[in-house]
Image (cartoon, rainbow, N blue to C red):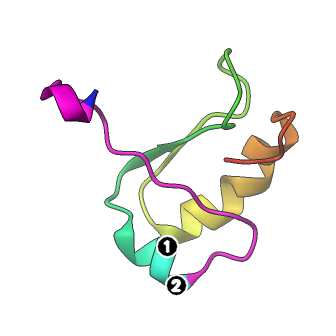
Amino acid sequence: FQSHSIPIVPEFYIDENFHQDDLKKIEYPVVLKPDDGTSGYGISICYNESDLKNNFQKAVNYSNTKKA
């Protein structure tokens, strides 16, 4: 959609290692959700890095691919 000038919400991908290079790119607040989830399960609003780390496992638990 970005290639057609349609505004979209930025996406950030993280894994359980929480690489500093990935964390630096994140603009808070963010919605943390399972990568392949279609319902409201596993979703959290994170206002800082601590929230993100504390809620990451909840999102992954609701993901078949184990990604958030």
Type of amino acid under label 1: Asp
How crowded is the residue under tag 2: few (<14 C-alpha within 10 Å), some, or many (20+)? few
Q: What residue is shown with label 2?
A: 20
Left or right of residue 38, residue 48 in this image: left
Looking at the image, which residue is at 50% across and 70% down? 49
Label 1 belongs to which residue?
22
Name the residue: 68% across, 53% down: 55
| 67 displayed left or right of 31 | right
Judge whether residue 7 is colored magenta.
yes
Choose top left, top right, bottom left or bottom right for residue 52.
Answer: bottom right
The outermost residue toward the front is 3
* Main secondary structure of the magenta stretch: loop
Magenta residues? 2-19
Left or right of 40: which side holds 67? Answer: right
Circle 1 crowding by C-alpha within 10 Å: few under 14, some 14–19, many from 20: few
Residue 39 drawn above or below residue 12: above
Q: Secondary structure at mark 1?
A: helix
Q: Residue at image x 17%, y 26%?
A: 4
